[in-house]
Image: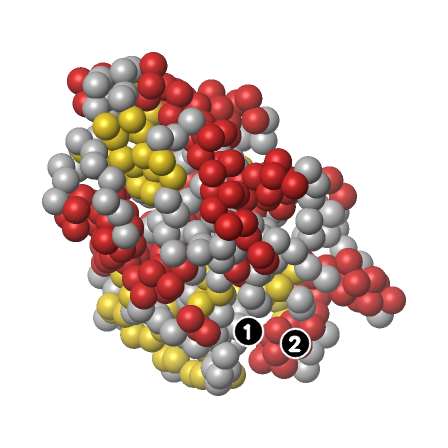
Amino acid sequence: MIMGGLFGVYSDSDCLEDLFYGTDYHSHLGTRRGGLAVKNSSGFQRFIKDITTTQFRSKFEKDIKKMHGNKGIGVISDYDDQPLIINSHLGVFAICTVGKINNIENLAKKALKNGSHFSEMHGGEINPTELVATIISQGDSFKDGIQEVQDMIDGSCTMLILTSEGIYAARDKLGRTPLVIGEKSGSYAVTMETCAFPNLGYKITKFLGPGEVIYISKNGLEQKITPGNRMQICGFLWVYYGYPASNYENINVEVVRYKCGSYLAKNDETQVDLVAGIPDSGTGHALGYASEAKIPFSRPFVKYTPTWPRSFMPQDQSIRDEVAKMKLIPIKELINQKRLLFCEDSIVRGTQLKKTIQRLYEYGAKEVHMRPACPPLVYSCKFLNFSRSRSELDLAGRWAIKELIGRNIDNPIEYTDPDSDNYKAMVEVIRKRLGLTTLQYQRLEDLINAIGLPKEKICTYCWDGIE
């Protein structure tokens, strides 16, 4: 699962150290490209690197010695090259984005008719950041251009724009992704992940609202567009791809994961010997479960990460499986003859999880129980890129439904009610295919309670199909 992340700095002095480390703190989002751009007296400087199998820091540590400036933006990009540097009637600017544009082809055709042109991205696709930059450049001001983007796109787009004088920070229209401003003496920073702030000395100043635009310059913070009334922040941030030390809407990820685990335990009477998390994102959920159930927490698997990329990043399935196998090292003494209960952030396809479960039995496990921290995924995300590379029909819930009824269906809404026979039959198919002793998913209302926001402010589309 991939998404992307943004970080920007405006400082009274050179900003490169903060920009470098702040951007790097977004690398956990599991993406393929990193980029930095700064503005100084000589103009704009930019570097973009492939970080698919190499850490961001090792790719950029030499380049940042060549860069200098008091303002800059950085991006961990899900698949396209950015930041881009654009020359327009608004002046030269650098831009980076996170989001998903579902109507990109229609918008590109419209722009081409108006005389615009696009560079080709990998595979001949239009770079969505370039499309956003084109729309902005057609506006009378950056403010108007950003507003035009938010009004025109189907999907979501959060962005940072670096100009000669400052930085525009714009959260997507419905706030599906977060954007937060921090401050320390002489500097402002803007980030998607607040985990970037503590070690750099920033204190949170403001969580941007949905669609809000803030301009950061020598004059401080200036609100260019006020926030909208409706928010649909992605609930999966707290479940899976957010970093444990980050806060969204002032709600900490790790705290939510403990609560998720606690809710799982409250709805469970299974007798087991130990509770564990599928590392790393399942760990917080498992700690919450173990504490509530008063069952020992243990680590029958440990992860070896120094030389292995994230297992979902390689494009070839066999390579992904090999990476997943080599990274998780079993501890037989904690597995043999044990009844094990694992908490996991989610079950997306289940391909790698099935192999992990098989290894547990090979090492002598008596029982293996699984407790995902969210409901079954039955809809592919329409608003962010974290499921971009997967067909909706690859989702565990969807292939289970097909196995049950012998065909694919467009809208599996009748399989989302945890009290229905259809839901129970779907979960049983998944349990059998994975080889689990028992499988019990989190209920959506418990997940919402763990997050602590009203349901209408959280996007739950991937679980219940409600937009």
Quadrant of image for the C terminus: bottom right
Does residue 87 appear in this view? no
State the mark number for residue 151: 2
Q: Which amino acid does label 2 sit on?
A: Asp
Q: In this view, does 240 lie above or below 331?
A: below
Query: Is residue 317 positioned above or below 210 on the image?
Result: above
- As drawn, 52 above or below 164: above
Q: Which of 350 and 402 is in front in this view?
A: 402
Q: In which quarter of the image is residue 83?
A: bottom right
Q: Mark 1 points at which residue?
A: 173
The residue sitting at 32% across, 65% down in the picture is: 449
Give the CA distance from mark 2 to mark 1. Answer: 8 Å
In front of the other: 351 or 254: 351
Label 1 environment density (alpha carbons within 10 Å; few <14, some 14–19, many ≥20): many
Q: In this view, does 220 lie to the left or right of 133?
A: left
The amino acid beneath tag 1 is: Lys
Q: Which residue is drawn at 33% across and 19% down?
A: 361
Q: Report if the CB atoms under discs 2 and 1 are less than 8 Å apart.
A: yes
